[in-house]
Image: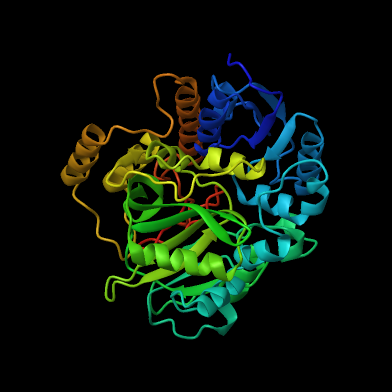
């Protein structure tokens, strides 16, 4: 397939998001053997021409401890030099057992103490306050009393684990984000029981555009950064990224760096912001402490984060201040289809629906003017085809479960964005990478 310059390998968990494939396409041509592991053989990365080996793993959503044991077994292989975190369960497991992993592989990710500050949003917003970074007004559900405002209810924790939720963590789901209509408080007891913890209430920021500050840190020092603005999500109210453009805004850079500096960060981070339309101020939503789903576009814009991550892991020097090209755009095609479907068939509170003609025109023009795609590339087409088959199967299952055909891909029956490994905020303020 490809000649290796040395008997070294990297392990990348296989997930549905394109981040796995982006790592393979970056690292394998450089002679680094790639191993993909997943609970399902239908993960798109398994069929990439840049995948050397596939191994089956337990599903972390069903047995997190067994998943951690499987990762440790992979780490003890003599050829594996590091593991790449692509979802919350990955980085949680790697950080929670960092010392054990360090006996076998390089560990370019944060300590568990630091990670907890990020995966517990109460602690995260306290760190943002210390760093002078703005955030929406936020409180625990049982402490919030102003239900006349537009608010969202969201999980306190970004992943269900025993350290966060206790011994019954595997019997509940932290849940996703729900918009609260002003004047209609939620059933607090039911929310707490369903989520297994006291969730957060947050003022709604009325902007569906998400601004992302992406970084790789080496023991408190930034070695590479990138920015993008999400122009379209999977739904017209927002959601995971369907189309985004590379940007550089000094104030976004300053806020992202200030927060990660305060945390003395080590490893990967995507810091998500929304911009307050009344003040122009960036407000923190969350930090994703692992690779983000739009990673293929980041690499296409010139910021090769998978290779930077590898260089950090094996102590190779990373050239100072790596640059990227601004003004570029990139698409996830199934995200664009989902966006158009939402315009035609869905209605979300507090967000004005764009006209179908304008939505179709905007998507079409951007596809022609900015022809960059997360999965669809000429030299590695199989992941795109595999992803398409996966999406088709999911849609068929949705339609079978919902005879009226009214359940949109990406939303559950309550109008919430389900947890697909990329945390999301609420309609009109949805962020997910």
Asked if residue 343 can be seen in this view, the reply is yes
Side of 227 relative to 15 (left or right): left
Coloring scheme of the render? rainbow
Total residue callouts: 0
> Residue 369: percent from the left, percent from the top?
21, 35
Identify the residue at image location x=77%, y=53%. Answer: 98
Q: Nearer the viewer, residue 216 or 189?
A: 216
Identify the residue at image location x=65%, y=43%. Answer: 315
Asked if residue 154 can be seen in this view, the reply is no
Identify the residue at image location x=71%, y=59%. Answer: 111
Q: Is residue 9 above or below residue 85?
A: above
> Residue 119: percent from the left, percent from the top?
62, 63
Q: Is residue 376 above or below residue 178?
A: above
Q: Is residue 163 above or below residue 17?
A: below
Q: Seen from this angle, which residue lies furthest top?
A: 1
> Residue 432: percent from the left, percent from the top?
46, 53
Q: Nearer the viewer, residue 121 or 149?
A: 121
Identify the residue at image location x=45%, y=26%. Answer: 384
Asked where in the image residue 333 lies, by quadrant, the reply is top left
Quarter in which the N terminus is drawn: top right
> Residue 72: percent from the left, percent from the top?
80, 41
């Amino acid at each position: 397939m490809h000649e290796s310059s040395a008997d070294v390998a990297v392990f990348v968990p296989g997930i549905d998001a394109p981040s796995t494939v982006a790592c393979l396409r970056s690292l394998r041509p450089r002679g680094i053997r790639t191993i993909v592991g997943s609970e399902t053989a239908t993960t798109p990365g398994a069929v990439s021409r840049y995948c050397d080996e596939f191994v089956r793993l337990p599903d972390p959503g069903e047995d997190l401890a067994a998943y951690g044991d499987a990762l440790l077994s992979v780490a003890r292989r003599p050829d594996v030099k590091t593991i790449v975190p692509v979802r919350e369960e990955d980085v949680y497991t790697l950080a929670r057992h960092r010392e054990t992993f360090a006996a076998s592989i390089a560990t370019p990710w944060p300590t568990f103490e630091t990670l907890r500050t990020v995966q517990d949003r109460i602690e995260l917003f306290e760190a943002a306050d210390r760093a002078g970074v703005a955030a929406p007004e936020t409180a625990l559900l049982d402490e919030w009393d102003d239900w006349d405002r537009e608010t969202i209810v969201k999980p306190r924790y970004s992943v269900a684990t025993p350290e966060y939720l206790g011994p019954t963590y595997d019997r509940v789901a932290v849940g996703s984000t729900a918009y609260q209509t002003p004047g209609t408080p939620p059933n607090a007891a039911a929310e707490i029981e369903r989520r297994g913890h006291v969730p957060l209430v947050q003022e709604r920021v009325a902007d569906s555009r998400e601004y992302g500050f992406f970084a790789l840190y080496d023991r408190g020092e930034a070695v590479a950064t990138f920015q993008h603005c999400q122009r379209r999500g999977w739904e017209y109210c927002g959601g995971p990224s369907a189309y985004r453009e590379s940007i550089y805004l000094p104030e976004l850079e300053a806020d992202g760096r200030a927060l990660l500096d305060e945390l003395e960060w080590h490893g990967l981070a995507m810091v998500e912001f929304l911009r307050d339309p009344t003040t122009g101020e960036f407000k923190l939503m969350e930090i994703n402490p692992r690779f983000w789903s739009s990673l293929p576009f980041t690499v296409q814009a010139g910021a090769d984060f998978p290779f930077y991550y590898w260089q950090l892991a094996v102590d190779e020097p990373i050239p100072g201040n790596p640059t990227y090209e601004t003004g570029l755009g990139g698409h996830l095609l199934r995200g664009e289809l989902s966006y158009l479907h939402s315009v035609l068939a869905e209605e979300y509170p507090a967000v004005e629906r764009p006209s179908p003609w304008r939505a179709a025109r905007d998507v079409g023009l951007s596809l022609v003017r900015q022809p960059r795609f997360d999965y669809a590339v000429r030299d590695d087409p199989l992941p795109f085809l595999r992803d398409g088959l996966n999406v088709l199967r999911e849609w068929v299952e949705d339609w079978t479960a919902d005879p009226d055909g009214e359940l949109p891909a990406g939303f559950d029956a309550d109008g919430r964005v389900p947890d697909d490994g990329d945390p999301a905020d609420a309609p009109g303020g949805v962020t997910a990478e």
